[in-house]
Amino acid sequence: MQLSLELEYWTVDTTGALAPAQPVIERIDAIDAESADPMLEVVTEPCDDVAELQAEVTERLCEVLAVAHEEDRRLVPLATPLCAESIDTSECPRTRIQRRVLGEEFGNATRCAGTHLHIDQISGSETDQLNLLTALDPAFALVASSSHDRGEYVAGCARSAIYRRGCYGDHPELGRLWPYAGSVDEWEDRIDRTFDRFRRQALATDVDPATFDDHFAPEDSLWTPIRLRETFGTIEWRAPDVTLPVETLQLVRDVRDAMDRVVDRGLEIGHRPGIAGERVTIPEFDRLGRHVRTAMDSGIESPAVGGYLEAMGFDPTDYDPVAREFDGVTSLSTTDAERLRLRYADRLEREVDALATEREAGRPAVSHTKDLRRVSPLRGRIS
């Protein structure tokens, strides 16, 4: 069951102001451009386990950070840009069509930086894999890295709230969490129906059919937290924020452990949630939805969310979400945002340096977030 990551980061200049990522993107093959100009995506190769993935992430980030410095850029591991400034975006045909169909609300999507985990589809277990990742959706609270946008407090997990509640207008099915699947065929039917509605709406707004078909396909035209990627043979989990890499790797480790259990034991829906029994059990979707909404609004501070995630195999004390450091902050100025971006750019670099040091010393891959915090002090409250 191979794993790979796509990690979206904001790019800023040496003052902390958002700045185009293009100078960095042009120099490195393993990163991609995003629709937001001051954002890039670091892409890893598929890896056999989390230790290999950690080495891959470390190597990729070392290269990107070095090139970024040469181009007077810094990478920021926050889920939103924090402040109220506008964000320059690419105006490719794909983006123009999205704006035409979804309206100006779609611009909110360019204010969100996330992490995408690709997990190999396991023959015969694909439906259980889809349903497990659906049930694990509230785990985005464990790695929430922003509670603010446009200078104001949004929610405990700002990116999830913005992306799911404020981007898709009359087409919420394009970005919301879908109910559990009865089969892969059923899931694929949902994809086709949703894509067909999107295409019909685009053509109804005078989008040229050939232009639409050149830039959209069912597999990559849904922005839901979970996507079935037949091209890659993976299931893509898009729920988490971008954050400091050790937090991300801890989440991947826990999700991989849960996925191994499901593949080995199978999954049942409609029971008390739990991962330790003969079969993995998950709640009815309506009950799950309540946990998702609470996680979005309150983050990991919610006892109900923490208890649910514990039952599903996570230890919330293994995590220290960056968003927690914004507690009590109601508003942020542009100057505040620039200062904070540089602070978290510094933290990202220190953490990658610590990972690289461990690797060069030939020590085993970090198996726990607390292990790395003993290596290098990484935390500090906002002040």
Image: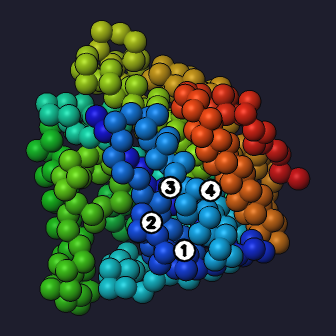
For badge 2, the amino acid type reads: Ile
Residue beneath label 1, please? 24
Q: Earlier in the sequence, mark 4 or mark 2?
A: 2
Q: Residues within 10 Å of mark 2 (few under 14, many from 20)?
A: many
Label 3 close to label 2 by CB (< 8 Å): no
Instruction: Find the distance from the CA under tag 4 to the CA under tag 1.
Output: 16 Å
Of tags 4 and 1, the one toward the viewer is 1
Q: Amino acid at mark 3?
A: Arg
Label 3, label 2: how far apart the Cα atoms are: 9 Å
Q: Earlier in the sequence, mark 4 or mark 1?
A: 1
Q: Secondary structure at mark 1?
A: helix
Which colour scheme appears in the figure?
rainbow
The residue carrying mark 3 is 60
Coordinates of residue 71 in the picture (x, y in percent): 64, 77
Residue drawn at (42%, 63%) of the image: 30
**Res. 162 visible in picture:** no
Q: Is residue 307 left or right of residue 6?
A: right
247 shown above or below 254? below
State the image coordinates of residue 56 (x, y, percent, origin top left). Answer: 46, 47
Tag 4 residue: 77
333 and 169: which is toward the camera: 333
Tell which tag, 4 or 2, sits nearer the viewer.
Answer: 2
Task: Name the secondary structure under disc 4.
Answer: loop
